[in-house]
Amino acid sequence: MSTLNPAAAAHDDHHGHHELSFIRKYVFSTDHKMIAVQFLITTLLMLMLGGSLALGVRWQLAWPWQNMPVFGQMFGSEGGQISPEFYTMLFTMHATVMIFLVIIPILAGAFGNFLIPLMIGADDMAFPTLNMLSYWFMWPAIFFFGLSFYFGGAAAGWTSYPLLSALPEAAPGSGHAQNMWLVAVTFIGVSSMMGSVNYMTTIINMRAPGMTLFRMPLTIWSMFITAILQAFALPVLTAAGFMMLFDRAQLGGALEGIHTSFFVPSGIVVNNAAPTVGGGQALLWQHLFWFYSHPAVYIMLLPAMGMVSDMLAAMCRKPIFGYKPMAYSLAAIAGLGFIVWGHHMFTSGMNPALGMTFMVSTIMIALPSAIKTFNWIGTIWGGKIRFNTVTLNCIAFVSQFVVGGLSGIYMAAVPVDIYIHDTYFIVAHFHYVLFGATLFGVFGAIQFWFPKMFGRMMSERLGKIHFFLTFVGFNGTFFPMHLLGVAGMPRRYADPYIHPYLEHLMPMNQFITVCAIVMGLAQLILLYNWFSSIFWGTESGRNPWNANGVEWIAPSPPPHGNFEEIPIVYRGPYEYSSPLVEGRDYLMQTEYLPPPGSDDSGDAADDQPADDQPADDQPADDQPAEDADDES
Amino acid sequence: MSRIFWCLFFTVWPIIAIVVCAISPAMDWAFPGNREAATPLGQRIDDLFYLITGIVTVTFIGTMGALSYVLWKGSKNEDEKAWFSHGSHNLEVIWTIVPAGVLLFIALYQIDVWAIYRVRDHENRDVGPRPSHLVAEVTARQFEWRIRYPKPGTKFTTYKQIKAWLAKPHEGDVYAVNKLFVHLNRETLIYLKSADVQHAFFVPDLRVKQDAMPGQSIDIWFTVNKSGKFNLTCAELCGWGHYKMRGEVEAVEDLEAKVKELKDLQDYDGVTPPGTVPAGASEEATP
């Protein structure tokens, strides 16, 4: 068989052959679905770890210097008291774990891996071994982050601004711990890069016949654009990380001779150490770091936007409102995302005229976000809504994203940002985007695609309780932080109350901490629901939601190779409530409908409608017709 | 039943959010210093903040209202099928152009404030701070603010002189820690340095914030128009004691007299009463 589709070839090669050993099947698996589940389990556990670290931070802010129960007993000093050094480490590692080990891998690693081949009708990723390595390169990162804890914990914030991060004397955690942190970030970068190359190749080359670019679900669009973002932004962070490693003196060993000063100016005396010799510029790190980390914000958001678009359409039984504007605005966000990094640096002392440029580009990035929001509301408009856990999480995504987007306007306005920069207003803003939007989207996606992963449904009742507690706890935690920020409370303070103008904010901080604990405990419900449903959930069948996507024609869970036959795609993924079919409100992408007026409605494949021909970039052989023959 | 509950749920929380914001000034969850900035520029920042708050509130009520409405309608939809619509070109155009207009307005409107605050003054020193406005050099270090005033009576007329003064300590300089005196109702010019890691000079009441970068000396200028003492804090993570960098800025009518007082205190040898000229000390001002 001559085919340009490598997946098809690979599929035929080992279809129904040898039984895989336990290790090859569950540990060093090259099957994208198993890798996705590995990513998902790892990131869910890391979510719990990152959340515990956050609760440590919250405890200190509510009841400073009081002995913290449980968590403080394990790691704190003197009966559970959180020392300022430990506090600094707590928020640094909270952000690090949440960003590098939860949000990025759960979106790209878990859902990207699971959904890309299934949604485009491929039988696996383009590079299955690379895919496996992408997961296993996360473990050295986890190991080195763990080692960083052992050495006292990196304590320069997740942004690691020099010189706090560049000089070992600057902080207790700035010795080996910071080195380990940098090494770990490099490993995570390698892991993400492997994923990104794989996703791009797979989406470009391995779409099923008929799956043109504009028939791809928005999830795939968002994964594709995210992969591009990663491929272009990550090398900068990796390079910057190496530059900082080389700047740090006590590397020893083979790197002894390398003692650069990219970021270290001369004549700096930290903690009575010898003055630095150099000529570097600390500001350089901020430019390099944010050149990666601002696009990274969209790496942490776009896939959730795509998944929510798909879920909302399915749950409202309506085509997505404005498919092309949705796809274009994803691309616009990604493009603009590369030229807004300076808005993290308005107070840094860079040329003020540069601030204006970044301000205008930053304000303009709100536009595609607004378009997307209106289109989501348009999608719900006139729908027949099923109020289940998936829908609730998606609506939460939209409404929390509105808050996060609107608070972003304050920051884009430079003069206002001067005041709110590095206050709790910023903390509120990015939690609304990263938790309020992304994580609610992920919670919805877990519930929505769980039946495809394991062939069973997650509990609706537990899902709704989890949603309710998380939503209430989330807003109770993060909404008041806007007000803390306006009141001038800076971030990263172990004890804000030594400043007279912040004293009266303590009760509010205590309220926030109580809400955060409720929200944290609610996540145990999610974990329980997830793990127990694998074994005891009700069986789901192939298409429990009556959705349109290609993934729903595969068995649940899909076998090795995903589809019994290569699917052929005839239309876009959002033809819900189509008047073309009677008696049901969905019309699957792979379902052949004869052109109106033709008589042979019974035989699907005798002639292929001209406008449904696979696009030019698809395999040019006559294989689609053959497969369709088999179907009938 | 559960549909009605969830529709109400998504309608009620934005209302709670707005109510919390509305009562926040009364609860003192708002700008410090009785919500009044102590610099003209701070007042412009506040005005801008309230303007954006107005726009944001209208948008928030609009989108949340629309969301509640479509949820409510969608939950009661008894039709066999949902509305089969792939979108509306006209609506897309409207909701692209209207927000674009509003965003462009915000962008252009606030450029002026930023221009006055930094750019114009920075480029054209005739309207901005002049060398004679120099008050002190503030050096941030773990975990305190070190302040150096020039010798009382020193007159600076060019930036070259300031540069020379900043370059090294001079005889007669007055030193202080964590307490900075500035002009009242007159422009104050400060040079900000860092002795070790990055810090940020943040005076919430004045709405002034500037990072102190290692290896750089960055100028800040502002005019305080309210007498009193203001909290000085650090806004950039600088190590475990970040929270401890508590300082104070005080605006005084006669700054020179105040600095002179500090100098006398500094020169006090424990014997000669402060205020009298110690033997051998010169009072001549160096230009």
Image: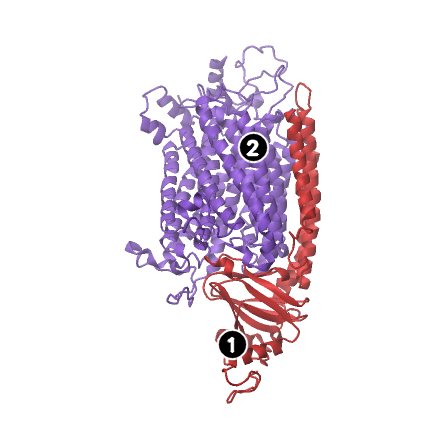
Q: Quadrant of the C terminus of chain B?
A: bottom right
- Eye-nearest disc, 1 or 2: 2
Question: What is the x, y in percent for residue B1?
Answer: 65, 24
Task: Confirm whether residue B135 shows in the render.
Answer: yes
Q: Residue at x 67, y 36 (%)?
A: B12
Instruction: Chain letter for mark 2, please.
Output: A
Horizontal arrangement in the rendering, residue B65 relative to residue A536 (left or right): right
Horizontal arrangement in the rendering, residue A386 relative to residue A168 (left or right): right
Q: Residue at x 59, y 40 (%)?
A: A475
Instruction: Chain letter for mark 1, please.
Output: B
Could you tell me the amino acid type at mark 1? Ala
Q: Which one is in front, A355 or B195?
A: B195
Tell me the shade of chain A: purple
Question: What is the x, y in percent for residue B55?
Answer: 70, 47
In the picture, the disc for residue B164 is: 1
Q: Which one is in front, A413 or A491?
A: A491
Q: Residues within 10 Å of mark 1 (few under 14, many from 20)?
A: few
Q: Which chain is red?
A: B
The residues tagged by marks 1 and 2 sit, at their Cα atoms, a distance apart of 63 Å
Could you tell me the amino acid type at mark 2? Phe
Q: How is the image coloured?
A: by chain
Q: Secondary structure at mark 1?
A: helix
Q: Which residue is mark 2?
A: A467
- Looking at the image, is A508 positioned above or below residue A15? below
